[in-house]
Amino acid sequence: KLVMEGALTALASVADCAQQEFVKYYDAVMPFLKNILVSATDKTHRMLRAKAMECISLVGMAVGVDRFRADAREVMDVLVTLQGTEMDSDDPTISYMLQAWARFCKCLGSEFLPYLPVVMPPLLKSASLKTDVCIKDLDEEDENGEDEDWETIEVGDKRISIRTSVLEEKATACYMLYCYAEELKEGFYPYVEEVTNLMVPLLRFYVHEDVRKAAVTAIPELLNDAKLAVEKGLAKPGHDMNWVKAMMDYILKELPDAIDKEPETELVGSMLQALHEVTDCAAELMDLNPQLKVQQMQQIMECLKGVMKKSAERQQERQERTKTEDFDEEELEALEEENEQEEEVLDQLSECLSSFLKKFKSGFLPVIDELWPLIMPMLEDPKRSSQEKRIAICIFDDIVEHAGEGGAALRYIEPLMPYVLRAAADAHADVRQAAVYGLGVCAQFGTAAVQQAVPSMVQVLTSVIQQPDSRDEDHEDVTDNAISALGKVCEFQRGAGFDTAATLGGWLDYLPVKGDKEEGCIVHEQLVRMVEAQDAALLGAQNERLPKVATVFAQVMNTDLATAEVTARMKAVLLSLQPMWGQLFVGMSPTEQQAFQQLMTTP
């Protein structure tokens, strides 16, 4: 029996790794697996049957819905029957079945919907399980001490025993609910309200962090499912956008407070991610009640302020630990893990602020101003980490890029520009990338506020691009962002104390941008826009730079370095220059000339 269980586990792992390649073995293994599922009914074979469920579901996901569809329905009918039987609370079948149903859902997609009414009642029951806790004095007999389903801790003069098997089932069920909400989208609508009312209070289920993690991951998906159902006309009468807003209001009332009280650093990052995903989904609905919106923004601001303060305190505490006498290699490993978790918190904090600035634009600046006393030390204090410096610069970038209407962001540029210019030469590549990107958005959106700094911007960006190791893998994204920023300076800040024609000539020589594909698309669209405008500063007085332009066009057309629309524009420009193709070939190798002609003749 143990050998068979191990074999099923190994087979499931092979299928999970092989994915589509496992199709060739499907006909050989599936009948065998189904036979175990229906025949292993004895109590001593419960784990074997559970392993068969797991293996079948993983094989199905590996080979795909088209191959698995017929067997999936047969197996799910068996599970429906099995689910209707009475099982012991310690039967592993329960947990394995919950996970198998979720895998069937992921494999079958919307075809799984008819089974939801069967799957959901026991799943909701498992997710709603109450915690079994036993509290006794230390001098009392510990009845659960030898039971592996219970975990015991001593607090003061009390012994607290918690039944962990119940918690694991609850955590699994909550995660499965997330899987259904994420996979089925608006198809999960009939259960959205009930599951949301179950999940939100679990943000404070401090007995088990996996339950909290599943809940916080599910919440944005549930809100999105509700919104999609309303938008597609699938919701029942009375469930309109006001209903979606009420759901969002409920979430925004509880989530910031849960973030503030969350004891696990890793989960703080997950909760911040949920916060910006919720606002990404339905932030426009906040405008339906301006008075409540003010309260919500205040609560979010206090939440983010608390996150920043606690993060700084944790980092200070870790620095102090490195100075103690008993700091050893084991402590160092623990510290590195904590630092990684802290970086995730800071990344998600940055994502939150970026999301809010994109959604609320200058309306979010009062919150930024409240946070500013906590942001500036990230730039000014040399003891703060490079990660914090990068986050501070990213916040500045987003302010300038997304909150500049009516000149609202200009007041941030002058005091922060010296920090950003220095950061462009920072030892850490991620700091440099944030800084050079920021110089680009300053050039594009900073209008006259940046003119005094433009010569320094050109000098700094050129220096970054011309570094000997600028095309090394670790630095390529920085270089590509610097090239993009330099192009923006040339386009939007002409006449601001630098030689535009000479700088554009150098900029053109740096193209195409191949490392950072997102920036590449932006740069190459800018190039074709300037060529369409017959920009003499770019092309040269006698159009002497046209061959280089044609070479760049030929290298990026019909690739992921240019959108289909930009490729079409490039092709139109080149076709208009057909009488000059002989001159354009001057800068191309024979292979490039052949590729160029093929591009021009392909519809």
Image (cartoon, rainbow, N blue to C red):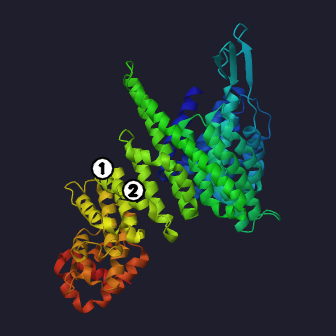
**Along the line of sight, which residue is nearer the eye, 592 or 69?**
592
**Residue 443 locus on image (x, y percent):** 37, 68
**Along the line of sight, which residue is nearer the eye, 425 or 27?**
425
Q: Residue at x 38, y 46 (%)?
A: 380
**Residue 598 locus on image (x, y percent):** 29, 81
Task: Classify residue 129 by image quadrant.
Answer: top right
Q: Residue at x 50, y 39 (%)?
A: 311
Q: In the displayed structure, does residue 241 sit left or right of residue 553?
A: right
**Residue 588 locus on image (x, y percent):** 19, 77
Q: Amino acid at mark 1?
A: Asp
Q: Secondary structure at mark 2?
A: helix
Q: In the displayed structure, does residue 454 sit left or right of residue 308?
A: left
Residue designated by label 2: 416
Residue designated by label 1: 426
**Along the line of sight, which residue is nearer the eye, 462 or 140?**
462
Toward the bottom, the furthest residue is 579
Quadrant assignment for the N terminus: top right
In the rendered image, is residue 561 in sight?
A: no
Measure the C-alpha gap from mark 2 to mark 1: 15 Å
Which mark's residue is nearer the viewer, 2 or 1?
A: 2
Q: Is residue 394 placed above or below 131 in the rendered structure? A: below
**Along the line of sight, which residue is nearer the eye, 121 or 128?**
128
Q: Residue at x 72, y 29 (%)?
A: 42
Q: Is residue 395 placed above or below 317 in the rendered structure? A: below
Which numbered disc, 2 or 1, marks the residue that appears first in the sequence?
Answer: 2
In the rendered image, is residue 218 in sight?
A: yes
Q: In the displayed structure, does residue 129 sit left or right of residue 257?
A: right
**Residue 265 locus on image (x, y percent):** 53, 37
Q: Residue at x 47, y 52 (%)?
A: 21
Quadrant assignment for the C terminus: bottom left
Q: Which mark is residue 107?
A: none
Task: Classify residue 600 by image quadrant.
Answer: bottom left
